[in-house]
Image (tube, grey):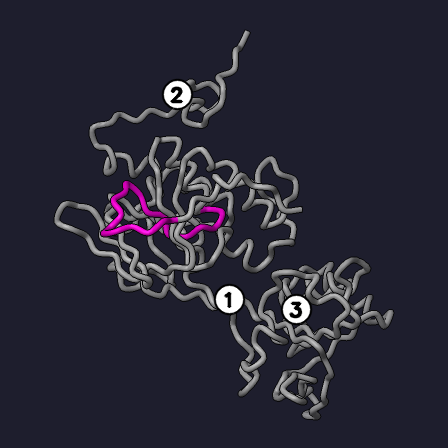
Amino acid sequence: MEAQLNPEVIKTAQAHEGPIETDAVIIGAGPVGLFQVFELGLLEIKAHVIDSLPHPGGQCVELYPDKPIYDIPAVPVCTGQELTDNLLKQIAPFGATFHYGQEVSTVEKQDDGRFFVETAKGTQFLSKTIFIAAGVGAFQPRTLKVEGLETFDGSQLFYSVKNPDDFAGKNLVIVGGGDSALDWALDFVKDGPHKAESVILIHRRDGFKAAPANVAKMRELCEAYEMQFIVGQITGYDEHDGRLTGVKVTGSDAVTRVVPLDVLLVFFGLSPKLGPIAQWGLDIERKQLKVDTEKFSTSVPGIFAVGDINIYPGKKKLILSGFHECALAAFGAMPIIAPEKKVFLQYTTTSPKLHKVLGVESPVFD
């Protein structure tokens, strides 16, 4: 169940004349970007957060809002939506301002050391620091290349599942051989509020890049005639009165068969695109931003990169790694934001100052 959030948790931007002057701009409102707000907040730095999506949560909410995550420290299991909701609660005391549905198009260093930042919608900032937490960049799903099929995008063709209940009772064709395809196929077959009328899984070969247990479960369900698996590739489609009625699947035997459907779900993964970030003069390696491991600074002082967007020796693309990077990046930014201020490591358990910042009462220890 989605957490009930206080309206003050999410502060969206109001109309503003001229550039917004701030200490920190965070690009990306996924889990790592949200936690960057927290780490800056502990150091009494307020941030503006920009995201191309119309909501917080990044990939977690966009791609698997209802799927369980098991590797968040001290949280045995939570969904992508629950993780996002809890992070929003955690950062509520720090008054971050969110700018949704906007992509940063321009970053330029100014003579006074600050950065001029502008979005494609014309929102402008003058910021002392920038924290890039853009995940894999301006990610886009890899699409099914069948001419004309894009006509049904958003009506009968989907590359992600926002609300599983929308597909309840439908005849589904799911395409892909990774975890997402297998997960959703199994999810829509089982009894529950969003059980499909039928599920047919299509993959170009009889081999999967998915959890072996899920592959075994899929084969078991096929043997029990509860779902179907077809080896082949979609090479065309049928329509009637403007509606998609079936897909043409060409098998390894070169025979093309028509598979009827109500909805086509395609999971080919994401195509990471740095987009405008590639033009900002930062050192890039394999579509990722090179950083040091002391403060996670990029090659441009004042611009930091945290989460999946960065690369360094030993890098692991885990949410918990991104959280660690946020803490060091926040401390690394302080000499730029407030060079006159001495910063000491304090603990939220015992620091009265941090308790004040967080808006909580200091505990009394015996």
Q: Nearer the viewer, residue 153 or 320?
A: 153
Q: Position of residue 303 (x, y in %)?
A: 28, 48
Depth-wise, is mark 3 or mark 1 nearer the camera? 1
Q: State the residue lying farthest toward the bottom.
A: 255
Question: Mark 3 or mark 2, which has the lower sequence index?
Answer: 3
Q: Position of residue 327 (x, y in %)?
A: 40, 37
> Which amino acid, mark 1?
Leu
Seen in the picture, residue 75 relative to 101 is either above or below; the reply is: above
Whole-number angstrom distance, CA of label 3 to CA of label 1: 17 Å
Question: Mark 3 or mark 1, which has the lower sequence index?
Answer: 3
Give the SS element for disc 1.
strand
Q: Is residue 350 left or right of residue 120?
A: right
Q: Which residue is mark 3?
A: 208
Residues shaded magenta: 13-32
Q: Position of residue 363 (x, y in %)?
A: 52, 15
Q: Is residue 312 shown to the viewer in this render?
A: no
Whole-number angstrom distance, CA of label 3 to CA of label 2: 52 Å
Q: Residues within 10 Å of mark 2 (few under 14, many from 20)?
A: some
| Label annotation for residue 270 | 1
Q: Which residue is mark 2?
A: 353
> Which amino acid, mark 3?
Phe
